[in-house]
Amino acid sequence: MNATSPTKILFLCTGNSCRSQMAEGWARRLYGEEYRFWSAGIETHGLNPHAVKVMAESGIDISGHRSKTLADIEEQSFDVVITVCDHAHETCPILPVSTRLIHKSFPDPPRLAQEIMDPEAALEPYRMVCEKIRHFMEILPEVLQENRR
């Protein structure tokens, strides 16, 4: 991370369908060109339509995102990898020594919503997690500063 190039940050989740996509969307909205952001999963589960919907409610369009793994990303050198779920943290691929790893787990919206039969009520767990991710993204510069090597 030098003064001439933005910090490269990857949000890593299990399936890159929901939480990491939300994190990338919020980060891009809040920080623009100050940092460069990507998201990926340990595996791919497809972009979650409920995540797309609740992000749109916040004015952020992630409908053009796609679910991908690290192998699908051309950029393979990240300054920071932020795991946003426990499974991704526990199974995180081996990273270069220079890459900082930060873990911030968020609840899994599909798991929280799986037994809710009303379609509108089933969006509430997604909204709750979206809000938690937004709050974390708002303090991202401080988190990065605290986790400096």
Image (cartoon, rainbow, N blue to C red):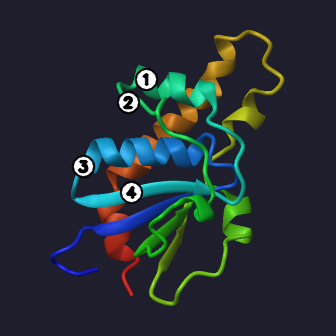
Residue 143 place in picture, x, y as percent: 38, 66
Q: Which residue is mark 1?
A: 56
Q: Which residue is mark 4?
A: 37
Q: Check disc 3 and give the amino acid type.
A: Gly
Q: Check disc 2 and give the amino acid type.
A: Ile
Q: Which residue is mark 3?
A: 32
Give the label on residue 91, or none.
none
The vertical placement of 82 against 59, above or below, is: below
User: For the point 41% across and 41% down, which residue is it?
Assistant: 25
Label 3 – label 1 distance at C-alpha: 18 Å
User: For the point 80% across and 27% down, which residue is it?
Assistant: 114
Give the label on residue 60, or none.
2
> Which residue is situated farthest in the right direction here?
115
Disc 3, SS: loop
Q: Quadrant of the N terminus?
A: bottom left
Label 1 – label 4 distance at C-alpha: 19 Å
